[in-house]
Amino acid sequence: MKTKQRSVFLKQGLLSKSVVVFMVLTLLMGALIIVADGYCRTHFGAGSLISSYSFVADIMFVFLGVSSFGKEFQYRTINMIRISHLSGFEVLVRKLLDFIFLALLSASFLLAELAIYKYGYHYSEVNLVTYLKHIYLDFAIYASILGDSVLELELKKEKKKDGL
């Protein structure tokens, strides 16, 4: 039963179709900026690559934050959580860790696109060391703040339901 519950949580949080679609969209957004700079001889710069990528990643995090708890009811795993040994807080912390993992994965994709932008099109303005320091931290903080707000809302709902 434990392995089945863990695989259900993993499938719902990280291996869903919406995560794959949003990851592909973020990669395509960055690729469009890179291709436009390379072939159209425009110079958007690394800032536009980061901002366009971050825009789609923001939409992904907000959508996944809202849908992550809706899937508990859709797949009817909410009943399994209630009768299992898992506390509500443990479920919420797992969801927060999913958010942070997805943020770090998104940051890795963005850094890979920045590396392609720098070395593929010879833009020396891109300082990967500086971006490496800041992007992982920024994405992780953003995902944890968004995850914490979703956790707080769900804990409030749970307390109201319990009559506290």
Image (tube, rainbow, N blue to C red):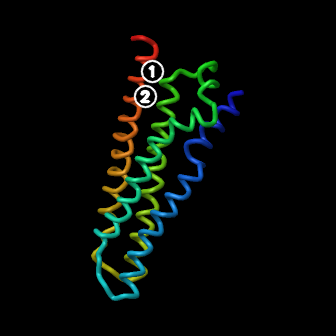
| Badge 1: residue crowd in 10 Å (few <14, some 14–19, many ≥20) | some
Which label sits on residue 154?
2
Q: Left or right: 153 with respect to 105?
A: left
Residue 101 appears at what percent x and percent y? 48, 46
In the picture, which quadrant includes the C terminus?
A: top left
Query: Front-most of 121 and 155?
Result: 155
| Badge 2: residue crowd in 10 Å (few <14, some 14–19, many ≥20) | some
Q: Which residue is drawn at 36% across and 41% down?
A: 146
CB under 8 Å between discs 2 and 1: yes
In the picture, which quadrant includes the N terminus?
A: top right
Query: The residue tagged with tag 1: helix, strand or loop?
Result: helix
Q: Which residue is drawn at 41% across and 17% down?
A: 159
Residue 5 appears at what percent x and percent y? 66, 31
Q: What is the tally of numbered marks visible in this picture?
A: 2
Which label sits on residue 115?
none
Q: Calculate the distance from the C-alpha at mark 2 to the C-alpha at mark 1.
A: 6 Å
Question: Which residue type carries mark 1?
Answer: Glu
Query: The residue tagged with tag 2: helix, strand or loop?
Result: helix
**In the rendered view, would you say 57 is above or below 147?**
below
Q: Residue at x 35, y 65 (%)?
A: 52
**In the rendered view, would you say 117 is above or below 129?**
below
Q: Residue at x 55, y 42 (%)?
A: 13
Q: Left or right: 158 with respect to 7?
A: left
Q: Give the quarter of the image for residue 84.
A: top right
Which label sits on residue 158?
1
Q: Left or right: 139 with respect to 3?
A: left
Residue 135 appears at what percent x and percent y? 34, 56
Residue 92 appears at what percent x and percent y? 48, 30
Q: Give the quarter of the image for residue 3.
A: top right
Question: Which residue type carries mark 2?
Answer: Glu
